[in-house]
Image (cartoon, rainbow, N blue to C red):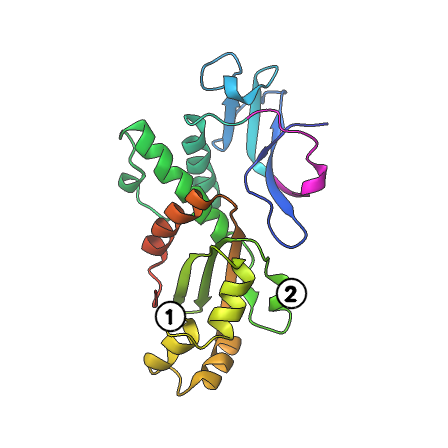
Amino acid sequence: MRPVLLLTDPVGPIPEILVAYVSSVLPVSSLPSDLLIDPVSPEGRPSNLKVRSVVRLHKLATIHVSTVVRRLGELSSVLRPTVAEKLSALLQIELMSGEARLEGGPAWLTSRVNEAFCKVVELLAQPKLPFDRSLRSTLPAEPGLYAISRQEGYLRAGRTDEGGLRQRVYQNHFMGNQAGNLRQQLVRARLCDDLEQAKQWIRQNCSVQVLVVQNDETRKWTEHLLRSALRPMFSD
């Protein structure tokens, strides 16, 4: 068995987790994306690692949730923002400026902002699913975050609660006719003449990214950063 750092919650109908490689063999020359964890230090102690180890964030993999045998420990609140910053630099994702990352600000504030930032980055790393015949069966029934986009930018972004991602994205935005759903908003914005045309327009022009997030509080607070960063055309 080899330790890994879990970077996501289980994702998709066949639950998989994005992980980073952890090794007790320290490299002679560290990479900018490497994170050294010393289990003797206060910030490294929650990991419960036996020896000094390095998280190699450039070595990412997707594993099935069944291959996770046990949870050894966790990243401390001090190291979590560092992981977020290293991943954003590695993947060249800039959702916020350096000032907005609150470097030098209160530790609790930096931790909260970066926790939400990591979830937004994780969502935008998900595959873009087309609005085709397979979408309903592909979307997870669990709650989470979503972002609907077209080539020119984002149309809707937010969270789901009861009903989950399948109901919110497919049954509401794609099939529904309620005032706050995407089809009605396209008609009101005069991008489409009626609800049926709006449905075809979504099918031809849009895709959706989804991320299962089980924790209610995480979904609620991340939604604010998600909408602020993506600035979708429509909202509730």
Instruction: Farthest residue to the top: give it.
Output: 40
Magenta-colored stretch includes residue 173:
no
Which residue: 32% across, 28% down?
107
Question: Which residues lie in the magenta part?
Answer: 60-73
The answer to whether any part of residue 206 appears in the image is no
Which label is found at residue 189?
A: none
Instruction: Farthest residue to the bottom: give it.
Output: 193
Sequence order check, earlier mark of 2 and 1: 2
Q: From the viewer's side, name the closer residue of 10 and 230.
A: 10
In percent of width and height, residue 65 lies at 67, 42
Q: Which residue is mark 2?
A: 137
User: Left or right of 151: which side holds 22?
Assistant: right
The answer to whether any part of residue 136 appears in the image is yes
Mark 2 neighbour class, 10 Å CA radius: few under 14, some 14 to 19, many 20 or more:
few
Mark 1 neighbour class, 10 Å CA radius: few under 14, some 14 to 19, many 20 or more:
some
Q: CA distance from mark 2 to mark 1?
A: 24 Å
Please say if 188 is above or below 165.
Answer: below
Q: Which amino acid is tagged 1?
A: Gly
Q: How many marks do you count on the picture?
A: 2
Which residue: 42% across, 43% down?
217
Q: Quadrant of the C terminus?
A: bottom left
Q: Which residue is mark 1?
A: 180
Q: Quadrant of residue 72?
A: top right
Which residue: 64% across, 65% down?
137
- Callout 1 secondary element: loop
